[in-house]
Image (cartoon, rainbow, N blue to C red):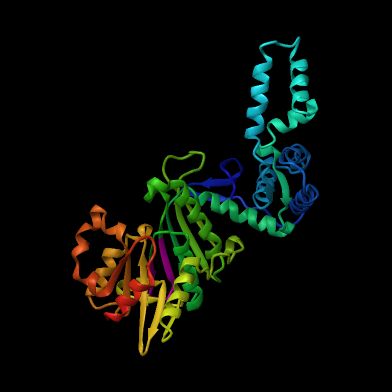
Amino acid sequence: MLNKETLRYKIDGDAIKPTFIGSKGTLLDLSNQLLVFWQSKLQETRAVINDEITPYLYRARNLQVSRGLNKLIEDRSEFTEPANQKEFRERAFAISTAALSQPCADLREHHKQLAQQLNLSSKQLYDQLYADLPQASVLSKACDLSGTQLIQTYNMAQAQGLLLYASQVDVAIAETDTNFRRKLLKALRFQRLLAKIKQDDAGNLLLSVSGPSAVLDQHQRYGLQLALFLPAIACAGDWAVTAQVRCPHKERRNPVQLFLDKSSGLVGQNKFLGYVPEEIEVLIKTLGEKNPDWQCDDQAPLLVVDKGEIIAPDLRIQTDDNVHVIEFFHRWHALPLRRRLEQIKQGQAKQLLLGIDRSILKRKEFADLAGDPLLEERGFLFSNFPSPSAIRKCIKAQ
């Protein structure tokens, strides 16, 4: 992810536009040169790399661009952290303190005597004393992107950097493939984003995602999750994102509008599409082992309820001729709970069962639901994560 210092954008009236770069010519050459440089510095320290990268950064007309490209490479490289030197420092400082009772003529002589007592040279003493600082970490694996991929990543990061400051994001997906929609909504859930999901009369999938300002106690983390969702959106054949954002450098007091769509040229990444959390995989496996006559998977159908709202359940369980789908309400997914109960009371989503984290019902705004008989009939409670026994009991009661 790019930081504020490497974000490039223009403000035109009430609109904000990220400044993208082309994937040909001098910037492509620079990207390749930076990647080759990092590959050549395997087993070098971060300090050495930071010193020697400077001439490369000044090869770009815009230093902000080269620094942004370099940051993305660094973020995708791996460093081996050095061994902790706390005990060595404590020993060295103790010897140094004791030696001050009979001080040497100068500091250099003091360091020399200290090194001798530690069976080190003066240089080894200097090197080892703070050898666990971040600058001493060693490059173990360099970024393996191509020059073109690095530029694509840079452009995506420019758009993501603005989404960190979003208060409201509306997404339109003109993608009719049900499997893709299911995967996209799973990615939404995986990023723990709060959204109202609907389908319009034309069949477009509409997502209204609350931005970081709606989750004030987790502003930075939520903004990052929102930004990480953009590459999944860009995997759609036809998509558009409209967001209200604050200016990163506070050029404007009022929010400005960010608009992105397939014409922006952003290349999607399917890293989170179809991702199944490990705990869900374990749950499915355990349910199948304990109930061999059941078919359990995460391929639950999308349910369309009133006003075109779409429900994306987490689990599908088939028992004999009956199919049950379960939506889990974790602490971070509590907002739709009251609406979901009302929809079930109205006879909608007849297949749907609800798994609810106990901590939700302890909140003031949901405390009245604790005695709702519908929870006993169509739901079950869990702590942190649903148990197979609770799911089995709920299904048997249907």
Which region of the structure is painted magenta?
197-208
Q: 41 or 273, which lies in front?
A: 41
Residue 155 as seen in the image, left or right of residue 147: left
Instruction: State the residue at coordinates (54%, 53%).
Output: 160
Q: 84 or 142, which lies in front?
A: 84
Instruction: State the residue at coordinates (19%, 70%).
Output: 373
Instruction: State the residue at coordinates (38%, 50%).
Output: 215
Position of residue 201 measured from the top left corner of the image (x, y, whole percent): 38, 75
Residue 325 visible in the snapshot: yes
Position of residue 350 measured from the top left corner of the image (x, y, whole percent): 29, 80
Write down the quadrant of residue 100 in the picture: top right
Write down the quadrant of residue 103 in the picture: top right
Residue 111 as seen in the image, left or right of residue 321: right
Write down the quadrant of residue 352 in the picture: bottom left
55 is higher (above) or lower (below) than 332: above
Position of residue 169 measured from the top left corner of the image (x, y, whole percent): 44, 57
